[in-house]
């Protein structure tokens, strides 16, 4: 197999003065390899540290909120981002650069975790572990985590340098690998890891990498690489494990979809990859200002209007008269897909015993104020009323990959490889829609590849809203150049009868389908090639 080498100082983004120390002293206690890799607890501690770079929902230690996937919605047509850390809001208006903090921090920190995983795999055999199977599992976890960080870099920046070994600084100036090499490397790493990992864990360890996690990551990898046959194959492996299922609430009258993102549904079989406690500030970051929140991620009208009616019709299918009435005097949650109420707080809604009135002057939630909604909408997903008393100290987990996403990946792959008549397409779409309280797919209307493609894309938009998936979807579909080259609008202002215009978005199709390689990396590594037009 072709070998790939670590990028030393180049990937450390400018730590040239301490290259040697940084390479040999980056384990949890900054001790030397000779003293560290002896006990099973050493492996456990080192492995726990590598898990630390998985993305959170609304709070991260990567720079200043740079690895938060819910805030990523603000770079798409899902939402407008505002806050006292305005990094994300530069992307949709065309002001992000290779020096933007999120661009730099995610790249730098991901490679630091990759480096830690490399050192783990190079040294774990030195430690004594009584159970050989458990020791092999530790290696599988590290290998899968290394693959995850490569995958995320690939999704954000395109083909990146592959790192599989820790080597001296003299080999630091490596080149970017090709798309084919990156995809092949990640897939092979996940195959190897899956062979070492169990299919299931007890609840205390269910956050760990497993066979299903590996197959799910392969599903995401192949879907975004455009290899639909392999994507469908990987997704079917996840399904056939019979480990995962769509969460169904046991409480009568409780929305299963809404409960999934709350404490009542936090323990479930839908989780495939998640970060424990990754939503500890969900309420503080996204709740209305009057409830102690900062209202940072504000849904757009485009997002709200994507939800069908309870009868399975889009707003455009209501007819010109009904659509005109809705546009002038919208009753947003009336007769709509229940996922809207579970994901978005709309004007006039009562939440935590407070009626929210963004268009009423003189109240904390007035639209446009600092730390108030800019669109008239608020993100509802992951806001549990239990956190209202201490909005900055919750303990909700954040799901990075869940089973519903894999089902949607699977049906998209089937449709894109022209197997749109495969019975699994409608079967799994219906499972997702039924769980949400929506009618089955109308096969008399959705009876072609093009029609099903449209349905699947809309289903992804509403099912996975604000979970950090939309950016990769509109990149993959090449629709960002349309969706992000228009005004971002909010709720209808009753005083004018028109939707609030928040900002004019800009998207350069020749540049913006990938992020730039950070400038500091470009300056450090003379062999690095920047993404086009950055």
Image (tube, rainbow, N blue to C red):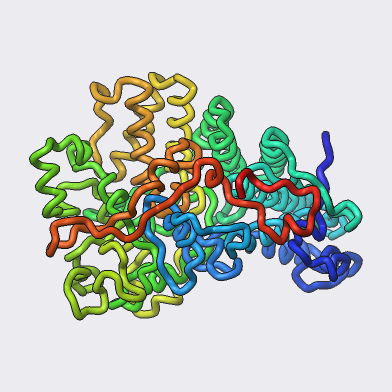
Q: Position of residue 517 (x, y in %)?
A: 66, 52
- 191 vs 218, left or right, is right
- 462 vs 279, left or right, is left
Query: Which of 382/11 is in front?
Result: 11
Q: Is residue 435 above or below residue 499?
A: above
Q: Position of residue 100 (x, y in %)?
A: 58, 62
* Number of marks in picture: 0
Q: Position of residue 115 (x, y in %)?
A: 76, 57
- Give me the residue at 67% from left, 61% from top: 109
- 508 vs 153, left or right, is left
Query: Which of 266/40 is in front?
Result: 266
- For the question of whether residue 159 can be seen, the reply is yes
Q: Position of residue 398 (x, y in %)?
A: 48, 59
Which image quarter: residue 285? bottom left
- Give me the residue at 26% from left, 78% from top: 364
Q: Is residue 268 above or below residue 520?
A: above
- Give me the residue at 26% from left, 74% from top: 365
Which image quarter: residue 228? top right
Q: Is residue 104 above or below residue 457?
A: below
**Which quarter of the figure is the N terminus placed in?**
top right
- For the question of whether residue 38 can be seen, the reply is no
Q: Residue furthest front?
A: 533
- 28 vs 364, left or right, is right
- Give me the residue at 68% from left, 40% from top: 186
Query: Which of 534/132 is in front?
Result: 534
Which image quarter: residue 281? bottom left
Query: Which of 412/180 is in front?
Result: 180
């Amino acid at each position: 197999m072709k070998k790939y080498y670590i990028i030393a100082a180049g990937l450390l983004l400018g730590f040239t003065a301490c290259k040697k120390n940084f390479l040999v002293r980056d384990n949890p206690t900054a001790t030397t390899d000779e003293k560290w890799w002896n006990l099973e607890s050493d492996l456990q501690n080192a492995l726990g540290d590598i898990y630390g770079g998985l993305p959170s929902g609304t709070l991260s230690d990567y720079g200043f909120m740079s690895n938060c996937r819910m805030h990523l919605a603000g770079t798409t047509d899902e939402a407008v981002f505002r806050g006292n850390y305005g990094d994300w809001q530069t992307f949709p208006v065309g002001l992000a650069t290779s020096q933007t903090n999120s661009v730099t921090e995610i790249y730098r920190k991901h490679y630091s975790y990759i480096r830690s995983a490399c050192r783990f795999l190079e040294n774990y055999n030195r430690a004594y572990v009584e159970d050989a199977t458990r020791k092999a599992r530790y290696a599988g976890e590290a290998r899968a985590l290394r693959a995850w960080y490569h995958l995320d870099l690939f999704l954000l920046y395109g083909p990146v340098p592959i790192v599989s070994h820790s080597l001296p600084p003299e080999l630091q100036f490596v080149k970017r690998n090709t798309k084919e090499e990156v995809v092949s490397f990640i897939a092979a790493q996940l195959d190897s890891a899956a062979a070492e990992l169990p299919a299931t864990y007890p609840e205390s360890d269910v956050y760990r990498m497993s066979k299903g996690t590996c197959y799910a990551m392969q599903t995401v990898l192949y879907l975004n690489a455009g290899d639909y046959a392999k994507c469908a194959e990987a997704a079917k492996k996840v399904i056939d494990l019979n480990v995962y299922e769509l969460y169904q609430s046991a409480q009568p009258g409780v929305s299963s979809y809404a409960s999934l993102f709350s404490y009542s549904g936090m323990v479930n079989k839908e989780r495939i990859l998640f970060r424990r406690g990754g939503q500890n500030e969900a309420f503080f970051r996204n709740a209305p200002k009057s409830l102690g929140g900062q209202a940072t991620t504000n849904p757009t009208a485009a997002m709200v209007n994507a939800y069908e009616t309870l009868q399975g019709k889009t707003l455009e299918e209501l007819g010109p008269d009904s659509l005109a009435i809705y546009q002038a005097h919208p009753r947003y949650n009336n007769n709509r897909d229940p996922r809207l109420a579970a994901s978005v707080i709309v004007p006039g809604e009562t939440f935590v015993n407070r009626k929210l009135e963004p268009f009423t002057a003189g109240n904390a939630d007035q639209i446009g104020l600092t730390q108030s909604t800019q669109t008239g909408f608020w993100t509802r997903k992951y806001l549990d009323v239990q956190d209202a008393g201490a909005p900055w100290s919750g303990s909700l987990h954040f799901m990075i990959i869940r089973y519903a996403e894999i089902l949607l990946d699977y049906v998209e792959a089937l449709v894109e490889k022209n197997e749109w008549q495969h019975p699994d397409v409608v079967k799994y779409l219906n499972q997702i829609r039924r769980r949400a309280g929506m009618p089955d797919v109308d096969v008399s209307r959705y009876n072609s590849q093009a029609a099903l493609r449209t349905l699947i894309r809309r289903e992804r938009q509403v099912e996975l809203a604000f979970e950090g998936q939309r950016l990769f979807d509109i990149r993959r579909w090449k629709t960002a150049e349309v969706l992000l080259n228009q005004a971002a609008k909010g709720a209808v202002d009753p005083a004018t009868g028109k939707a609030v215009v928040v900002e004019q978005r800009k998207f350069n199709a020749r540049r913006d389908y990938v992020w730039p390689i950070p400038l500091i990396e470009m300056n450090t590594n003379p062999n690095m090639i920047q993404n086009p037009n950055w």
